[in-house]
Image: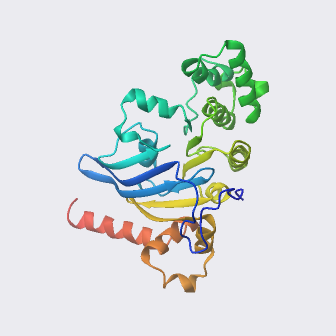
Amino acid sequence: MSQANPNPQTAPSGERAPGPDPVIRCTNIAKIFDGRTVLDDINLEIYPGETMVIMGGSGSGKSTSLRLMIGSMRPDRGSIEMFGRDICALNESQLNDVRKQFGILFQSGALFNSMTIAENVALPLQEHTRLDQDIIDIQVKIKLELVGLREHADLLPSQISGGMKKRAGLARALALDPKVLFYDEPSAGLDPVTSAQIDQLMLALTKQLGVTSVVVTHEMDSAFTIADRMAMLDKGRILKVETRQWYERLRDMPLEQVRGLPEDEQLIRQFLRGDADGPITARRDQSAFTDDLFGA
């Protein structure tokens, strides 16, 4: 299970206890594509040292949320504060200064195929610092050692496995000693054993480095292993932001108690368990019937 957060942040009632200011604060975020609202009135706070898992089905808006937080797109409404600065109001140069304080592990690893693993990790240091190459080489070895790849530094991405590519991408994300790490589907495309190894690596790095982690995933085994808190997205809205323990209780709740829950919580439980029957499938079936009926 995830390590306990050194900063107590959640009261027994589920409300926030007094503590540090959030590293990231999303306020009334909306994003619209071609007249379709993808995110609607999103409010989310992420605190120092915690691992926040953002989950939801395909098309729920979780990947769009990630892109907004890293500044690769801007919301149509609302604000996103990171380290106390509204990144929506920054120009590209100012935004790049903020980006130096966070790292990103992309779903595919996003390594440059023509460069060795060591060269991939060195690139952010060469681009964004004035360190001598000798110092950069030492930093690269340290980062590769953290993810267990120091002995593979001279290999090309085509010469390593999918799990090793993820670890190499993580080493590159750590190159500038970020305060925040963003993970985009870190378990995607990996076998169960390798996925579990990546989860344990994420936990170890969080404990060793004290970074704040934001993880976008639909892999529930991974989510329940690494999360301190979890946010459930559905059709562009946040249904619930709660502790991992709250979600565990909902997942494991006896069926006879579930019928008395609000529909949103029944929907969340179906998603957590991967059940074939429930509000999600009922909604899909009704939508397909309506589309067919009216020729949509």
| Residue that extends furthest to the right in the rendered view of this protein | 151
Task: Classify residue 147 as left or right of residue 253.
Answer: right
Considering depth in this image, is 52 or 260 the residue closer to the camera? 52
Figure quadrant of residue 5: bottom right
Q: In the image, residue 291 lies at what x, y percent?
A: 26, 63
| Residue that extends furthest to the left in the rendered view of this protein | 294
Residue 5, placed above or below residue 107: below
For image coordinates 21% across by 61% down, the residue present is 295
For image coordinates 71% across by 43% down, the residue present is 205
For image coordinates 42% across by 52% down, the residue present is 26
Query: Which colour scheme appears in the figure?
Result: rainbow
Q: Is residue 218 visible?
A: no
Q: In the image, residue 60 lies at what x, y percent?
A: 42, 56
Q: In the image, residue 171 lies at what x, y percent?
A: 66, 32
Q: In the image, residue 111 lies at what x, y percent?
A: 58, 27
Q: Quadrant of the C terminus?
A: bottom left
| Residue that extends furthest to the top in the rendered view of this protein | 133
Figure quadrant of residue 105: top right
Figure quadrant of residue 155: top right
Considering depth in this image, is 5 or 274 the residue closer to the camera? 5
For image coordinates 48% across by 81% down, the residue present is 261
Residue 99, placed above or below residue 279: above
Count the marks: how many?
0
Q: Quadrant of the N terminus?
A: bottom right
Q: Is residue 16 visible?
A: yes
Task: Classify residue 280 as left or right of residue 220.
Answer: left
